[in-house]
Amino acid sequence: MAVDIEAIKAKLKALNSYGSASTTSSMNLWYPEVGEYTIRCIPWSDAPDGQPYHEFSFYYFGKYKMLARSQFGHSDPIKECRDKLFSTKKDDDKQLAKKLLAKTRAYILVLVRGKESEGIKVWSVGKEIHSRLLNFFLDSEIGDYTDLNSGFDLKVTVKKLPGKKYNDTAVDVARKPSKAFGDLAKLEELKKNVPNLRNVYKEKTYEECKRDLDTWLSEGAPSDGDAGTEHNAPETTATQAKSDKPVTKTTETTKSNTDQKLDDLETLFASVNNS
């Protein structure tokens, strides 16, 4: 029997990735397209005390997306660089520092009504939707809408508005209490299939973060547009990013300025490490 090299490679890849949840492909993400939906938010079993959802802060620059190490109390070269840039009070440093601000995402467990057979999904939302969802808890007429026995479904409407690059998402409460799922014991079993988010979004080491930062800076710190969301505002890679300005060839002067900026940043890092 002839050996199929490509088939063996595919098998090895599958074996090496088995049991690993290092990418979002291992998570059943919900991406609402234009339309109307009814969903039920399900509380995480391992959410922080008193909180219904998980939150993570990420850095987005160029093709890089990484967890902010500082949110876990770990040394963070991106934050160190950003703080130093802000401290110089220079306009160009300030603009570069703003690109290194972390963006927070909230992760909501949902059942999509009419598609319960697809299991529990994870909805990743930004600041505006997250704030609205949290404010529902403070409404005396709503309260804990995630309660499995007497909570409320949510109505999600996604529209494409003229002149807007990304879809507009509105969320409201269906003001009629209901049970989240017919068989709550089965629902708990379904929740066990949801991966641990810390396994999905791996934290990079200090050295890995600094290496990616240095690479991005050496490329001239390209503009990232509206990076920072996972669907309505897609993350932009360095090769996908497009500027409104005409593309011009890189001159030796530009290269020199970039090299100087890298030298300045190395000095900043050195001062952090020696302080």
Image: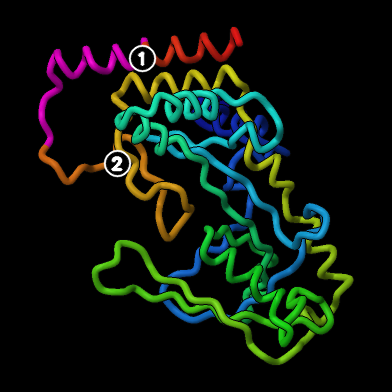
Q: Nearer the viewer, residue 171 or 119?
A: 171
Q: Residue at x 41, y 16 (%)?
A: 265
Q: Where residue 240 is drawn, which disc sits there?
A: 2
Q: Spot the residue most to the right.
A: 185
- Quadrant position of residue 45: bottom right
**Residue beneath label 1, please?**
262
Q: Is residue 249 magenta?
A: yes
- Numbered range of the magenta stretch: 247-263
- Quadrant position of residue 189: bottom right
Query: Of helix, strand and loop, which one carries label 2?
Result: loop
Classify 10 Å Cα crowding around label 1: few (below 14), some (14-19), many (20 and above). Answer: some
Mark 1 to mark 2: distance in Å? Answer: 24 Å
Q: Point out residue 159 in the picture as x, y percentages from the top left corner.
A: 39, 76
Q: Spot the residue most to the front.
A: 89
Q: Residue at x 36, y 14 (%)?
A: 262
Q: Nearer the viewer, residue 97 or 116?
A: 97
Q: Compared to 53, does 41 lie above or below?
A: below
* Quadrant in the picture for the C terminus: top right
Q: Residue at x 71, y 32 (%)?
A: 73
Which secondary structure type mostly characterizes the magenta part of the structure? Answer: helix
Q: Compared to 215, does 226 lie above or below?
A: below
Q: Amino acid at mark 2?
A: Gln
Q: Is residue 231 magenta?
A: no
Q: Residue at x 52, y 11 (%)?
A: 271
Q: Nearer the viewer, residue 21 or 144?
A: 144
Q: Compared to 23, does 183 lie above or below?
A: below
Q: Where residue 166 is drawn, which disc sits there?
A: none
